[in-house]
Amino acid sequence: WPGSNPKDNDFFLACQDRSFEQVKVSAFGSTHRADCLPEDDHFLGMLVQAKADVTCIFGKSWDLHVEQALRITAERNLEMIEGSVAYLKEATQKPVFYDAEHFFDGFKSDPGYALATLESAMSGGADRVILCDTNGGALPHEIERAIGAARGHLPAIQLGIHVHNDGGLAVANTLRAVEAGVCQVQGTINGIGERCGNVDLTTIIANLELKYGYRCLPEGRLQGITRLSRKVWETLAFDGPLGQPYVGSSAFAHKGGVHVSAVQRNPETYEHVTPESVGNSRKILISELSGGSNVRAKLANRYPELQGKTSATNILEDIQDKEHAGYSFENADGSFDLLVRRHLGHFSPCFEPIYYRIYSPANESASDQNDVTIAGAIEASVKVRIGDEEILCAAEGNGPVDALNQALRQALQARFPEINDLHLSDYTVRVINSTQETAAKVRVHLEHTFEGG
């Protein structure tokens, strides 16, 4: 939004010095203020100065907003829409798109006026009009009916769709809009947006290409959509939903033994598309609900010994016993791999823990016992055996986990320098039998990242 903040101004200025092969930069803003002419509006002027490939402005299509948000007459709103579009068309000499904000709510309230706002945008020279479900509450049949009315009222109009996901129908509404004849979809990668989000373009693109036969991306590029999705989540420092359609890490995950057995014979039995078509991969989960087919499928390439049913059955029984006791192997591939190695006689630990101790000094005069700079750091000592050598190390840390981590690293790093590239990225603790209160068992889940070459 040029003019809204210095960062956006710098962005559009930087774009003027670059050429993009596959991107068209769009500057976004609103219709001009009610108390001035288009050419005197500061923000319309900033849109012109942005020199973007496309300019997109929004205006009001809902009489409720015209009366209560803008507090102007219906006629003045129509003048602002037409005047703003016409000014930008003349000043930029480039395409101008008009976002009809709250169009579907406006159509339900006053169909005639909502359509009149589109007509004003067209009269001003809008190259495309995007119909917006800004509150995200429209239903698919309402989307279809309103689009049909718009196309019937203005046969030459080129329409786009912009929906939010407040009702959980963003994907359904967008696909219905495409079926009804729109030629553009506005959305975001992973559906990131205010409130409940916008429509997820990764889902829309995959559906349109694989289910509807549209070509949305250059040939072969659909296979990169999972990588794109995860890169965006990573940039935002978020973990995307496991079950995000097409691109989630569990989008093609199979757990039930019956499912896995069938997928091994023919993936179409439980997969609506191939995971490779969107750059994802199949995942076999292991739990007490699994069958021997899960174990064999998960480790067929790594452990040929599992081709025989006896090994798989023994491993499955061990998993079921451990999960009954509180373990969970569903998202713990490392623990599962160690369990299998033990069964196959491949388990050879690099070190053996002998004991560890934690010391927490009490500073009763400290104002905040949780502040280690006041109350004192936690101290941990760890003794391990590596081969025939016993090593004892101690370290301080910000809490017992950090102290143990530092002490264990000291004990191991001389023999295993690669541990310096191994980092604890996350850990969670879950109470298993809460009725036992402080004597309850807990399940600890650790995640590490390795930054070595």
Image (spheres, rainbow, N blue to C red):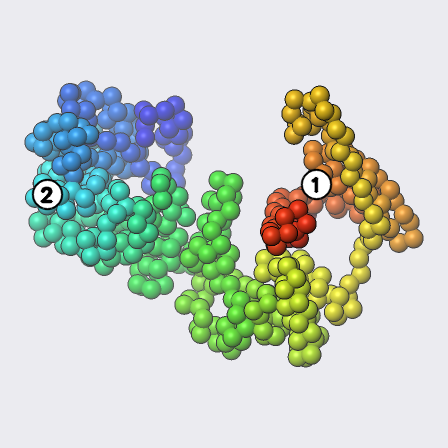
Residue type (three-letter) at the residue carrying disc 1: Val
Q: Nearer the viewer, residue 37 or 114?
A: 114
Q: Secondary structure at mark 2?
A: loop
**In the image, is residue 196 above or below residue 219?**
above
Residue 140, numbered circle: none
Number of numbered discs on residues: 2
- The picture places residue 417, in percent across and down from the top left corner, at 78, 44
Q: Is residue 99 left or right of residue 235?
A: left
Residue position for label 1: 401
Q: Is residue 96 left or right of residue 383?
A: left
- The picture places residue 347, in percent across and down from the top left corner, at 77, 63
Q: Is residue 162 visible?
A: no
Q: Is residue 43 left or right of residue 82?
A: right
Q: Secondary structure at mark 1?
A: helix
**In the image, is residue 50 above or below residue 299?**
above
Q: Nearer the viewer, residue 160 or 115?
A: 115
Residue type (three-letter) at the residue carrying disc 2: Asp
Residue 110, numbered circle: 2
Q: In the displayed orientation, state which residue is furthest to the right.
A: 388
- The picture places residue 178, in percent across and down from the top left corner, at 24, 56
Q: Residues within 10 Å of mark 1 (few under 14, many from 20)?
A: few
Picture quarter with the N terminus? top left
Q: Is residue 149 left or right of residue 383?
A: left
Indicate the quadrant where residue 209 lies. Answer: bottom left
Residue plotted at (74% across, 69% down)? 343
Of labels 1 and 2, earlier in sequence is: 2
Residue plotted at (64% across, 52% down)? 436
Label 1, label 2: how far apart the Cα atoms are: 62 Å
Residue plotted at (19% across, 53% down)? 142
Q: Is residue 113 visible?
A: yes
- The picture places residue 386, in percent across and down from the top left corner, at 86, 51
